[in-house]
């Protein structure tokens, strides 16, 4: 497995590299500290997973997320940031991020966490989810938020399983329905939530307090 760390803080960068290189995966890890170097490393290394900081000295990590979405959409991307506001989180998810992790909230079992992300699960630091839910509850008509009731009970069940990392076949087996029916539910969910990816659907439904994870 190939991993990329794009982080300008040398202490955090080296700490993450040391932890990643100690994992059972025995990954190849490349670490850089700027947006330009991150872009070049993505093209050269073509990593399976990238940890990307948003505040880089020569630009925003969102630019790199956009670039990866256009050129290597299969790559798993995890944002590593100190910013927990709704705007940055939603922007990252919309550009294909598989998760958003606060720097002071890295999972203790990083190996298991990476396995879950590589299996398709979407991850938000608990502090981020709680913060966004509180914001939505305080202002439920905020632009871009989804009000409860937009999904049927079955659609919510499907999306909750997707949030846990289930593939369509696993969702179908769990609910006792066909994979074709699951695909139809997913299509309807995307349409209702006005999203284009599983990660964005999970984030929008979670932040809108429509499902619990």
Image (tube, grey):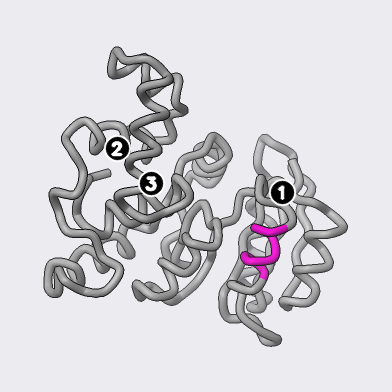
Disc with the residue nearer the chain's start (2 vs 1): 1
Distance in Å between CA atoms under marks 2 and 3 = 14 Å
* In the displayed structure image, the side of residue 148 where residue 168 appears, left or right: right
Q: Which residue corresponds to mark 2?
A: 160
| Disc 3: CA contacts within 10 A as few (<14), some (14-19) or many (>=20) | some
Which region shows up in magenta? 64-70
Q: Nearest to the eye among marks 1 and 3: give it.
A: 3
Q: Which mark is residue 190?
A: 3
- Can residue 66 be found in the magenta stretch? yes
Tally of marks: 3
| Disc 2: CA contacts within 10 A as few (<14), some (14-19) or many (>=20) | many
Instruction: Assign the N terminus to one quadrant of the image.
Output: top right
Q: Residue at 50%, 43% (x, y): give it.
A: 113
Q: What secondary structure is found at the residue carrying circle 3?
A: helix
Instruction: Assign the C terminus to one quadrant of the image.
Output: top left
Query: Considering only vertical position in the picture, is 173 above or below 12?
Result: above
* In the displayed structure image, the side of residue 41 where residue 178 appears, left or right: left
Q: Main secondary structure of the magenta part?
A: helix
Q: Residue at 26%, 65% (x, y): give it.
A: 145
| Disc 1: CA contacts within 10 A as few (<14), some (14-19) or many (>=20) | some
Q: Which residue corresponds to mark 1?
A: 21
- Can residue 73 be found in the magenta stretch? no
Residue 156, x across and y down, in percent = 23, 38
Residue 212, x across and y down, in percent = 22, 45
Q: What secondary structure is found at the residue carrying circle 2?
A: helix
Q: Answer yes or no: do the residues labelled 1 and 3 have beta carbons within 8 Å?
A: no
Q: What secondary structure is found at the residue carrying circle 1?
A: helix
Q: Nearest to the eye among marks 2 and 3: give it.
A: 3
Residue 13, x across and y down, in percent = 66, 68
Q: Residue at 47%, 69% (x, y): give it.
A: 91
Residue 73, x across and y down, in percent = 66, 50
């Amino acid at each position: 497995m190939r991993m990329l760390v794009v982080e300008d803080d040398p202490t955090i960068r080296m700490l993450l590299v040391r932890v990643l290189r100690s994992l059972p995966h025995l990954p190849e890890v490349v670490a850089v500290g700027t947006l330009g170097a991150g872009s070049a490393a993505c093209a050269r290394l073509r990593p399976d997973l990238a940890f990307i900081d948003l505040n880089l000295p020569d630009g925003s990590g969102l630019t790199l997320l956009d670039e990866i979405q256009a050129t290597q959409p299969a790559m798993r991307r995890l944002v590593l940031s100190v910013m927990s506001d709704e705007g940055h989180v939603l922007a990252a998810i919309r550009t294909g991020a598989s998760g958003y992790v606060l720097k002071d909230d890295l999972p203790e079992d990083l190996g298991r966490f990476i396995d879950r992300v590589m299996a398709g699960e979407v991850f938000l630091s608990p502090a981020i989810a709680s913060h966004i839910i509180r914001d939505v509850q305080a202002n439920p008509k905020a632009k871009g938020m989804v009000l409860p009731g937009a999904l049927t009970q079955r659609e919510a069940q499907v999306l909750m399983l997707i949030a846990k990392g289930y593939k369509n076949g696993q969702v179908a087996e769990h609910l006792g329905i066909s994979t074709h029916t699951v695909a139809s539910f997913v299509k309807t969910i995307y349409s209702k939530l006005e999203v284009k990816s599983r990660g964005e659907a999970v984030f929008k439904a979670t932040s809108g307090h429509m499902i619990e994870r």
